[in-house]
Amino acid sequence: MNSRLIHQNKRQRGSTLFATLGFVFILALLGSAILSSTMQGLHLTRHQSEKAQAFNIAESGADLAVRWLKDQPYPPFGTTPFDPFGGTFSLGEGTYSVTIYPHPNNIGSSLKVYTIVSTGTLGTRSERVEVVVREQSFGRYAYFTDREVSSVSGGAIWFMWSDRIRGPAHSNNRDGSNFRVSWQNGGQPIFEDQVTSSGSEIIYSPSRPTTEPQFLSIYRTGSRGYQLDVDPIPLPNSSDLQRDVAWGGSTGFPTTNGVYVPSNGGIFIRGNSSINMSVNGSGNQVFQITQGSNVTTVTVDTLNNVRHVQVNSGPTTTVPGAGSGVVYSMSNIEGLQGTIANNHTTGGSNPEVLARNAYTIAVDVNAERFIRVTGNLQYQSTPNPALPITHPTNVVPGTLGLLARDVRIASTAPTNLRIDGLIMAGSESTSNGSFYLENWSTKAVGTLTTMGGLIQKARGPVGTFSGSGIVSGYAKNYWYDTRLADFPPPYFPTTGLYDRLSWRRLAMSN
């Protein structure tokens, strides 16, 4: 063989080997790059998975803290941050820890606000969330009942086609009771806002609506206007909180009848009484409390943070502090009427509140004490539910709440009566409790106008109907005061639930 050819073949084989080695090297580099990329991807995926799990754990910790708040008999006092669980706890493959920060303005606030910061950790990864919650007031309801039955007869009570419920409505439907609605096709809706029921059905007359126009004759939003099978909301167990706030303590209550004005409380009454509310020339709230021959006049000067007390024509004493805003009686309030003063504001077209005139009048609910309304009980200025709560028309008026086993309208009350305020009758511990007219079956026909909300253990009668007409008592003209969900009267009972005001994810250095 030609030596030149042999040499050329050797060079070709060497070139082929070099090319093969180069190709293998490139493949190795590519494999290493792919392996590195894969490892980085797996690491990133694991990192993202751990972050996601840590975030879910943090969210779960916040939810557990909200549940803890809900389970407390009273909202936590004070403004010092605290750990509700006392340390770090395992959840799944990770851990969580929680701190609750009470809002600095909680002392004296109608609705307490809490900021919950929850940290979830999985391995080396941590996530943190912040949730701000606020107590939920019964003032969010225009209408609320525990049982949809009459407090007088125990029988069913119907919503009539002429009724107007102008705000959210709820019933726990206890004892198998149900909403009962008598409606007219093509009529105005009975319920202007959402209806929620713990029951599984609503009973209709003459028949159940089946078309959207028929539902619109009952609910403002048609077939979307109601929700069934929601969780029941318990009424408060007692009026002990209002008692303690009015007295300024939970022990040492007076044993002698009279009116007491403690510096660290509100107004505390022992013995039956009648109360007339009025407004003096300085815009201050005046309570005139009558017990037999004694008349105690308490003037609340919220601007100057004092109260002036006078018994009959005796000397006037000054008590420091405008008080808690709670008037509590261990006995019946046999007569209540008058005017609730406006808030003290800066005035002008965009007023700001300098001092609220807001009051809760309560009696011993579980001892079956009552409040009897004997005349008009109304705000000095009338709020307008059609306007935002920040509108001057709604900033100026004060607020009032009534809490008793029964809130009665006296048989001697005016034929046309006005009651402003948030009314609650009954408790979780009472067998009954309602808002009703004492002579509902015989009183001359008139109109009852309310501005507020009505919460009852059972439904009380204010009149009788025959067909589509009223026969005795009051026709209902009930208006919902939209301010009460956010600005209820002081220490008025809450639902035990908490509304979520905000949520955000906090930055963590991982």
Image: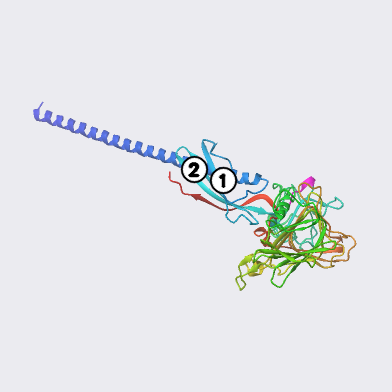
Above or below, 90 relative to 392: above
How many labels, in total? 2
In this orientation, which residue lies closer to the viewer: 297 or 16? 297
Which disc is residue 327 wearing? none
Which disc is residue 52 wearing? 2
Residue 354 rendering spot, x and y as whole percentages: 62, 66
Q: Residue pushed farthest front?
A: 315
Question: Is residue 143 found inside the magenta-colored segment of the image?
Answer: no
Bin the neighbour count of mark 1 within 10 Å (Cα to Cα): few under 14, some 14-19, many 20 and up.
some
Q: Is residue 466 left or right of residue 185?
A: right
Bin the neighbour count of mark 2 within 10 Å (Cα to Cα): few under 14, some 14-19, many 20 and up.
some
Q: Which residues are magenta?
A: 171-176
Q: Secondary structure at mark 1?
A: loop
> Who's the residue at 72% across and 54% down the image?
247
Q: Earlier in the sequence, mark 2 or mark 1?
A: 2
Quarter occupied by the N terminus: top left
Residue 445 rendering spot, x and y as whole percentages: 86, 66
Real-space Cα separation, disc 2 to disc 1, in angstroms: 27 Å
> Who's the residue at 64% across and 49% down the image?
75
In this orientation, which residue lies closer to the viewer: 432 or 386? 432
Question: Is residue 172 found inside the magenta-colored segment of the image?
Answer: yes
The picture quadrant where one finds residue 65 is: top right
Residue under pointer 1 = 82
- Give the amino acid at mark 1: Phe
> Who's the residue at 64% across and 59% down the image?
486
Mark 2 or mark 1, whichever is nearer to me: 1
